[in-house]
Amino acid sequence: MTSASWTRKELALIVVIVAFACTAAFLSVKLTRAKQSPDASLGVEWQYTATTRES
């Protein structure tokens, strides 16, 4: 059986790819989650999403 012997360049490439994937997943969750309104008069459960408005 052959062992998996990776060079430093291959390990660095794997680390960069994993870091990019984690960053993309974090940003996709963070940017698409609904935010609570800063206006207290609307109530606790009212939320808005940052989407484009239709005219």
Image (cartoon, rainbow, N blue to C red):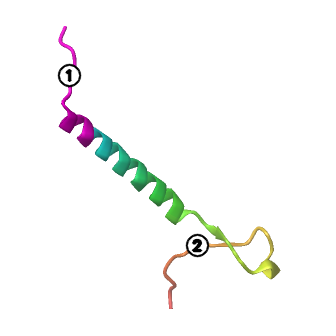
Q: Is residue 41 left or right of residue 55?
A: right
Of the residues under marks 1 and 2, which one precedes in the sequence? Answer: 1
In the image, the segment drawn in magenta is: 1-13
| Residue type at numbered disc 2 | Thr
Q: Residue furthest front?
A: 8
Provide residue 50's location: percent of width, then percent of height.
54, 75
Q: Which residue type does callout 1 highlight?
A: Ser
Residue 9 in the image: above or below residue 3: below
Residue at 30% over, 46% down? 16
Q: Which residue is mark 1?
A: 5
Q: Examine the rendered structure and indicate whether residue 29 appears above or below residue 19.
A: below
Name which residue lies at 76% across and 68% down: 45
* Residue sitting at x 49%, y 81%: 52
Residue 2 rendering spot, x and y as whole percentages: 18, 12
Q: Quadrant of residue 48?
A: bottom right
Residue 9 rendering spot, x and y as whole percentages: 19, 38
Q: Secondary structure at mark 1?
A: loop
Residue ID for mark 2: 49
Confirm whether the magenta stretch covers residue 2.
yes
In front of the other: 28 or 14: 14
Lateral position of residue 8 relative to residue 38, left or right: left
